Image (cartoon, rainbow, N blue to C red):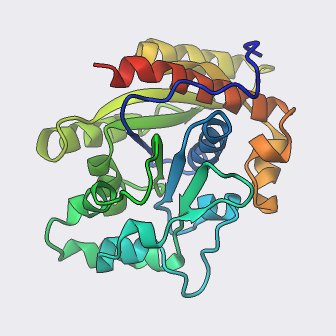
C-alpha cells in the first residue's frame, strides 16, 4: 500500500499516548479499530495496551484474553481500586500487545460508580498508577453509549479517535458526541481533543460512501486519516478466531488498511506529542 517494510519499526511517541475510541452508535467499528490498530502498532516496535471498557468484552475476545466467569477485570479496577497491573495480560503470540479485559460485571459499574467519590476519574487514577512496564499507546475501547464508562475513558485520555462508518446517517449523533467531548474538556480534562477520525466500512462501489467520506473530511479536516477501512469479510471473521485481522489474514484488504491507518497514527505522533 504505502511501500513500507513490514518488519520496520515505526517511530515511538515521545510520551505515552492514551487514546479513547468512542462513538455512541453501535456497529461503527470501535472494537475492530481498537484491536487492529493496537495489533499493527505492536508489530512495528510499539508497546500497546488495550483497555476493554465495553461489558460485551469483544476486544478481550478478539485479543484471546480470558474474560468469563470470575476473571478479575477492569470492573475490579474501577469499583474496587484493584491496580491495573494485576489484570493486564499479554496477548498470546504478540509480545508487545497487552489487554485489560472486561467482564459482564462491568454492565453494573455504570450504576455503582454513581455514588463513588471522583467517579469520573477512576480510570485516570488507575492509568496514572500503572507503571508495571512502559507502554507507548493505550487504546480504550468504549461501550456504545455516553454514560459514566465513556466519561471515565475521556477523562483518562488526551485524545479521542472517532470511527465513522461510510453509511447513511453517519454524522447523526456525532454532534452529541462532540458536545460531550467539549463538556469533559471544560469541566474535567482540559487537555482532551479529537485527534483522529477514521472512515470505516467503506464500499467503493457506492456513490453514498464517497459522499459520506467527502462530508466527513469537510467537517473534520486534517483530523481524518487518509486511509479508509473497506468493508471486509475477513475483518468480521477474525475475532471469532481470537485474532485481529492483522494476524488472521495479513494480506487481506482490511488488514492492509488497518496497518496503513496505524502507520499514519504512528508517524503523526511526532506532531501530537512533540510539542
Q: Position of residue 265 (x, y in %)?
A: 52, 26
Q: Toward the viewer: 36 or 46?
A: 46
| Residue at the spot 76% in from the left edge and 61% down from the top edge | 242
Q: Quadrant of residue 3?
A: top right
Q: Quadrant of residue 146?
A: bottom left
Q: Position of residue 258 (x, y in %)?
A: 68, 32
The vertical placement of 38 against 84, above or below, is above
Q: Is residue 33 left or right of residue 136?
A: right
Q: Residue furthest front?
A: 133
Q: Quadrant of the C terminus?
A: top left
| Residue at the spot 45% in from the left edge and 49% down from the top edge | 24
Q: Toward the viewer: 34 or 148?
A: 34
Q: Is residue 128 visible?
A: yes
| Residue at the spot 52% in from the left edge and 77% down from the top edge | 104
Q: Quadrant of the N terminus?
A: top right
Q: Is residue 65 left or right of residue 119?
A: right
Q: Is residue 109 left or right of residue 170?
A: left
Q: Is residue 182 left or right of residue 217?
A: left
Amino acid at each position: 500500500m504505502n511501500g513500507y517494510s513490514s518488519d520496520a519499526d515505526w517511530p515511538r511517541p515521545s510520551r505515552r499516548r492514551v487514546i479513547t475510541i468512542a462513538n455512541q452508535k453501535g456497529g461503527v467499528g470501535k472494537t475492530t479499530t481498537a484491536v487492529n490498530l493496537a495489533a499493527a502498532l505492536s508489530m512495528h516496535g510499539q508497546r500497546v495496551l488495550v483497555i476493554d471498557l465495553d461489558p460485551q468484552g469483544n476486544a478481550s475476545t478478539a485479543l484471546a484474553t480470558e474474560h468469563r466467569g470470575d476473571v478479575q477485570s477492569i470492573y475490579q479496577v474501577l469499583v474496587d481500586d484493584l491496580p491495573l497491573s494485576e489484570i493486564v495480560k499479554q496477548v498470546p503470540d504478540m509480545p508487545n500487545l497487552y489487554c485489560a479485559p472486561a467482564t459482564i460485571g462491568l454492565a453494573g459499574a455504570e450504576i455503582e460508580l454513581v455514588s463513588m467519590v471522583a467517579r469520573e476519574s477512576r480510570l485516570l487514577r488507575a492509568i496514572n498508577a500503572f507503571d508495571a512496564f512502559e507502554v507507548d499507546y493505550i487504546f480504550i475501547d468504549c461501550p456504545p453509549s455516553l454514560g459514566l464508562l465513556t466519561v471515565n475513558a475521556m477523562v483518562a485520555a488526551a485524545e479521542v479517535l472517532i470511527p465513522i462508518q461510510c453509511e447513511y446517517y453517519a454524522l447523526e449523533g456525532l454532534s452529541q458526541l462532540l458536545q460531550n467531548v467539549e463538556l469533559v474538556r471544560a469541566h474535567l480534562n482540559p487537555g482532551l481533543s479529537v485527534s483522529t477520525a477514521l472512515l470505516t466500512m467503506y464500499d467503493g462501489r457506492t456513490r453514498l460512501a464517497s459522499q459520506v467520506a467527502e462530508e466527513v473530511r469537510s467537517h473534520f479536516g486534517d483530523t481524518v486519516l487518509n486511509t479508509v477501512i473497506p468493508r471486509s469479510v475477513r475483518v468480521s471473521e477474525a475475532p471469532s478466531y481470537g485474532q485481529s485481522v492483522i494476524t488472521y489474514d495479513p494480506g487481506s484488504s482490511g488488514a492492509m488498511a488497518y496497518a496503513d491507518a496505524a502507520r499514519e497514527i504512528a508517524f503523526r505522533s511526532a506532531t501530537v506529542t512533540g510539542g
